Image (cartoon, grey):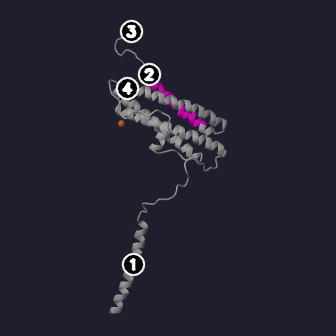
Amino acid sequence: MGDNNRGDNRSNNREGSVANAILARARPRTGQKGREIQPYGTIVKLSIALEEKACAASVANLNQLLADTMTLRDLYKKHHWQVSGPTFYQLHLLFDKHFKEQSELVDLLAERIQTLGGVTIAMAPDVAETSIIPRAPRGREEVPSQLSRLLHAHEIVLKESRTMARQASKDGDEGTNDILVSDVIRTNELQVWFASQHLVDEPVVRGDN
Ligand SMILES: [Fe+2]
């Protein structure tokens, strides 16, 4: 009888430790801290038939443009929330449309950087340190100032994009050149047209005659 009990206990213990091992495997391994696998500013070249020097030059340019595009994107959301006055509704909608289009450009630029073997800038403090777009105040601004601030930011983005597009082409990086010309430059130019027409001082009801 006593021997049987000891045997039952032993097999219960064995089953218990098997169950614990299974549960241990199901437990999420949280709180892990490893090393970075690729530091910012380095290139891990992929098989895209482009020289490392060309990849590095494009990545450096694209990270600058990415920081500025993220800043412009956030400027649109800020103004979408903080806009006021008689054109509130149309600008509220327009600013959000441009925000979404800038968000798509952000993803396109970031994934191009990774495709070139680089590391994307990503987090707000790093973006703030890198962007050359002047810092906006925390408070609300009137519509003409909001629009002027946006147009200035667009012009910074357009100017650097054209320079970067020429360099990418010169380096044989036509993929980057295509994104800069077909996506970044065209989108920004179109948004400038839409935003700037709200700063034309035309009569609303009674014409000049
Ligand atoms: Fe909204």
* Numbered label attached to residue 109: none
Q: Does the magenta segment cover residue 196?
A: yes
Q: Are marks 3 and 4 in contact (CB under 8 Å)?
A: no
Please name the amino acid that badge 1 sits on: Glu
Local SS, label 3:
loop
Q: CA distance from mark 3 to mark 1?
A: 92 Å
User: Mark 2 — residue?
Assistant: 197
User: Mark 1 — residue?
Assistant: 15
Residue 133 at x, y = what percent? 48, 33
* Numbered label attached to residue 208: 3
- Relative to 36, residue 18 above or below: below
Q: CA distance from mark 2 to mark 4?
A: 13 Å
Q: CA distance from mark 2 to mark 1?
A: 76 Å
Local SS, label 4:
helix
Q: Residue at x 56, y 33 (%)?
A: 161
Q: Are marks 3 and 1 in contact (CB under 8 Å)?
A: no
Local SS, label 1:
helix
